[in-house]
Image: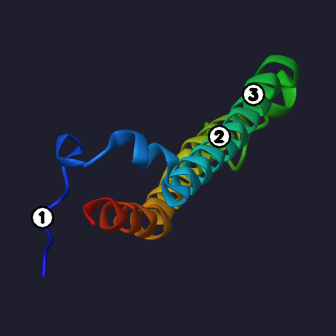
Amino acid sequence: MLQKPLLPSEAADPQAMLRDPTFQALVRERSSFAWSLSIVMIVVYLAFIFAVAFAHDAMATKIGAGPLTLGIVLGLAVIIFAFALTGIYVARANTRFDDLTRTVVKEQAR
């Protein structure tokens, strides 16, 4: 059974929501998780860029008999890694963050 979402304008007291420990936990966990994933992605991306810039010979190494190089494979791996991190964030948002959001909405609806 779907519940009607509580709109921010319907909240009784926005300041009370800001003081709510569950809301603060939600904001803290979501920010921490998002920053952690962002830092991981930046490190992977910069490692790839530095490898392209400073390990040109290694990145130009051919893989197999065709035109495929190690740089192309690693570039695709960086893109796939970004999709994987997005999936990890979405999975966490759909479980933990949504649970915390529902708890905050219930507490504010009282």
Residue 7 as seen in the image, left or right of residue 86: left
In the rendered image, residue 67, in percent from the top left (x then y), is placed at 61, 36
Q: Amino acid at mark 2?
A: Trp
The quarter of the rendered structure image containing the N terminus is bottom left
| Residue at figure coordinates x 62%, y 37% from the top left | 75
Q: CA distance from mark 1 to mark 3?
A: 44 Å
Q: Specify few, some or many for label 3: CA neighbours under 10 Å numbering under 14, 14-19, or 20 or more.
A: few
| Residue at figure coordinates x 80%, y 17% from the top left | 53
| Residue at figure coordinates x 79%, y 32% from the top left | 47
Q: CA distance from mark 2 to mark 3?
A: 16 Å
In the rendered image, residue 101, in percent from the top left (x then y), is placed at 39, 60
In the rendered image, residue 14, in percent from the top left (x then y), is placed at 34, 41
Q: Nearer the viewer, mark 1 or mark 2?
A: 1
Residue at the disc numbered 3: 46
Residue at the disc numbered 1: 4
Q: Earlier in the sequence, mark 1 or mark 3?
A: 1
**Mark 1: which secondary structure?**
loop
Residue at the bottom extreme, as displayed: 1
Q: Amino acid at mark 3?
A: Leu
| Residue at figure coordinates x 51%, y 47% from the top left | 19
In the rendered image, residue 64, in percent from the top left (x then y), is placed at 70, 50
**Mark 3: which secondary structure?**
helix
Q: Amino acid at mark 1?
A: Lys
Residue at the disc numbered 2: 35
